[in-house]
Image: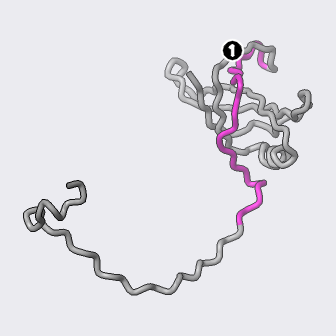
Amino acid sequence: MSTTVTGKLNQAASQFQAGDSTGFGIRIGVQYYDREIKDKAWTNYEAAIFAKAPGQIAFLQQSLVEGAVVEITATSEKVKSFDGQNGQRLSIELLDAKLGFVHSSAQPQQQPQQPRQSAPQRPQQPRPQAQPMDDFEDSDLPFN
């Protein structure tokens, strides 16, 4: 079963070398309302995205910046425990993560497209009208 998480990057992705690929470590915080404590709380996710092609690497470098909204899909998850500034913290690691969507204000905006010139209109030919089946003879049918 796969998991998909959409959220805002807490900070820019960290970049690292992984063999012949470049890896990008990302952290996502998703806020929710915790009914037990009657206050807002956070679930923290982390994932690594890998790219080999120079164009993909450049795109991820420009896009995975602080504040970018990303959608990550993973095949499975792993709960991680670590020492944070406020004591023991938990995070959910998204394994075999794939980037589904990314939007950041750092991405170049697309140029508005010029309106297309419409092709000259052809005069419409009248369509042949269907005839009721009882107007046909059996010899008129193609499968006889």
Task: Point out residue 121 in the picture as x, y percentages from the top left corner.
Answer: 45, 85
Task: Point out residue 47 in the picture as x, y percentages from the top left corner.
Answer: 74, 28
User: Which stretch is magenta?
Assistant: 86-110
Q: Is residue 109 left or right of residue 31?
A: right
Figure check: 32 above or below 104: above
Q: Residue at x 74, y 54 (%)?
A: 105
Indicate the secondary structure of the residue bearing disc 1.
strand
Task: Point out residue 129 in the picture as x, y percentages from the top left corner.
Answer: 21, 73
Q: Is residue 138 left or right of residue 72?
A: left
Mark 1: amino acid: Val
Between 120 and 37, which is closer to the camera in this rendering?
120
Q: Residue at x 80, y 48 (%)?
A: 59
Location of the N terminus (image quadrant) = top right
Between 3 and 116, which is closer to the camera in this rendering?
116
Q: Residue at x 61, y 26 (%)?
A: 41
Most common secondary structure along the magenta stretch: strand
Q: Residue at x 70, y 29 (%)?
A: 97
Between 72 and 125, which is closer to the camera in this rendering?
125
Residue 11 is drawn in which quadrant?
Answer: top right
Location of the C terminus (image quadrant) = bottom left
Residue wearing tag 1:
79
Q: Residues within 10 Å of mark 1 (few under 14, many from 20)?
A: few
Figure check: 138 above or below 71: below
